[in-house]
Amino acid sequence: MPSLLALALKSYHDHNCRQIFLWQPNRLFTRTLLLTEMHVRLLHCDRSGAYKTTPINIHDDPCTFVRLLLGLSSTEERVLGLDTNIQWTVKSGKKVAGTISTLSPAGKRVKYKLDMRDPYFATQLVRGRGTVCWSARDRSGRHILIKDAWRTDPQVPEYTFLERAKGLEGVVQQLAYEGSLRKTKDLRPDCFNFEDDDFYNRTLSRVTMVRCGASLCQFKSQRQAIAALRDAIQGHFNLLKAGVLHRDVSMGNVLFGEDGASVGNRGVIIDLDMAIMAKGLTAGIITELPAGTRLYQSICVLDYDRGLVPVPHDYLDDLESFFYVLCHLLHGYEGVDSPVDGAFEGSAALARWEHMANLVASSMKREYIEFGGLAVNPPPLFWSSTCIRLCDEFRQYLLPLVNSKIKLRVTRDDVERDALARDLHRGFQTHYTDIIGLFDTALEDLRKPGGEDPRVLPIRGSSTPLPSELSYGSSETSSSSGFSVSASSSRKRSAGDIEDAEASPKKRQRSGS
C-alpha cells in the first residue's frame, strides 16, 4: 500500500535527518525528499521540528520535481542549511582543521581555531535546544568554549544570566555572545501555520565562555571531588545573591576549575539554560513540567502535580539536588574512572530515583533522607569514612528543611503558608554556610594522613555492630551489592520545551530543555 510505503520512507528519513545533525553539528536545517513512484514531498527538519509539503505528482508536475532536485543539489553551504561561520579543512575525506567565527570580548568579529582533538559536543536530539559546544583556542592559545543553543521565545537567554554572573566565584564566566543568529520561523514558508500548538519558534544564540575542567564524575581523588562540589554550592549561593536561581543542579553541570584553582573556583557550576530570575529566594510556582534533571530533582519538584498546594521552586530544592549529586558519586562510583556496574538497575537507590514514576521516586528519596539511606544502601568501600559521614550529615541537615517544605504544601491557608515560607527562608544564608561548613570539615579530614583510605569491612562476630559501623561501614563489596552506574556520567534533564520523542531515555532525563 502506498500509505504504508510513505510511512516507512518517513521513518527512514527521520533517522537520516538525526544522523545528519549529529555528524554535521554546524547544520541549521536539513531538507530531503519523500519519494514514491507517483509522488514527492519535501521534508524540512530544524530545531522546531519537521514539516512536509503536500504530495506533488511527479508525472503531472515534472518541472517542480526537477526544481526540488536542483535545489537539494546546490553547492552553496548556506542553501543546504549549513552555518557558514564554521569552516572545515578537509584532507582525504577527513576534517583535519576547523575555525569558528563569532564576536570577541571587544565586540569585533574574530575567527577562532577549533581544537581538533575534541572539536565539539552535540546533543543527539533534533527537535529542542540542539546544544552544540565547540572547543576552541583564542590567539593566545587559551582554551575557550563556544556554546550554540536554540531557545524558545518565552525563555530568558542564558547570556542574560551569565552577564549577572560576571566575576562570581564558582560560576562559569562568559566572554562574549551573539544573541540572535537565526530563527526557525524564518526557515518556514509564509503559508506555514505559525499559530499551531506544536510549533515553537527557536532562536540560535552563540555564547563564548572560559573553558573549565572535566566533569565532576571524572574526579581523580575524593578530595578533589568534594572540593569541587563545595565550591559549586558556593557558586550557586553567589548566583542567588545576584538574583539568579539555577534550577538544574546535576552531576554534568558541575565541572572542575582550572588546574591549581584557588578556593572558590575548584568547582564551577555551568549551564544556566534553565535558570530564572529569582523572586527573592524562589522561582515561580510550578504549573507545567518542572525544570531540572530527573535523577537530581528534589522531593517537592518531583511530586509537584500530586494535588497538594503548589509552592515555588526555591533554593532549597537546588540544595537538595546537590545532595543527590553527592549520592550519585558515592553510590555510582567505586573508584577513580570506575563507575559501578548496575547502580541504575533493579532496586538500587539510583535506579529508583531515575526510573520510577515521579511520585514513587519522590517517596523513595524521602525514605532515603528520613531513614538514613546510607546505612541501608552502603556505598562501595572505596569511599572513605569521611565522605560517608559528610553525606550522612548533609542528609540530617536537609531532613527538617525537606519536612518544612512538605508542610508548606499541605497548608491550605494562604496567610499561614506565607508566614511559614518567610520563616523557612529567613535562614537562607545560614543554610548555605552550614552546608559549606560540612564540606570544609570533611576536606580538613581528607587532608590528614590516611584521610582518603577506603573503608574496611567490619569484623562479623557475636557482638552487635556499633551504629557508626552501620552508618559508615559497608557490609558488602560494590560488585555484590548491585549498586552501579552505567558510567554515563551526567544524568541530564526532563521537561518544559518539547523534545524529540525518540530521545528517551534522555541524557539523564532533563526537564525543561
Image (cartoon, rainbow, N blue to C red):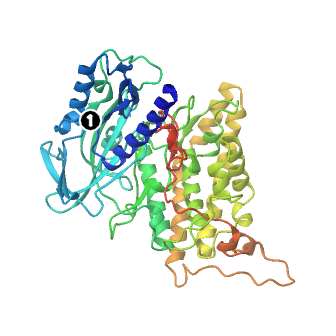
Q: Position of residue 382 (x, y in %)?
A: 59, 76
Q: Position of residue 92 (x, y in %)?
A: 19, 60
Residue 256 picture quarter: bottom left
Compared to residue 348, the image places residue 495 above or below, namely: above
275 left or right of 456?
left
Count of numbered labels shown in the rendering: 1
Q: Residue at x 70, y 74 (%)?
A: 474
Spot the residue most to the right: 462
Q: Residue at x 62, y 58 (%)?
A: 344
Q: Position of residue 416 (x, y in %)?
A: 68, 29
For mark 1, what is the residue? Answer: 179
Q: Residue at x 57, y 41 (%)?
A: 425
Q: How many residues crowd mark 1 within 10 Å: few (<14), some (14–19), many (20+)? A: some
Residue 234: in sight, yes or no?
no
197 left or right of 150?
right
Compared to residue 282, the image places residue 389 above or below, namely: below
Between 137 and 341, the one lying in front of the other is 341
223 left or right of 81?
right
Between 128 and 422, the one lying in front of the other is 128
Residue 33 picture quarter: top left
Compared to residue 216, the image places residue 462 above or below, namely: below
Q: Position of residue 285 (x, y in %)?
A: 56, 30
Residue 56: in sight, yes or no?
yes
Between 203 and 267, the one lying in front of the other is 203
Type of the residue with mark 1:
Gly
Q: Secondary structure at mark 1?
A: strand
40 left or right of 67?
right
Compared to residue 56, the image places residue 343 above or below, namely: below
Q: Residue at x 72, y 46 (%)?
A: 363
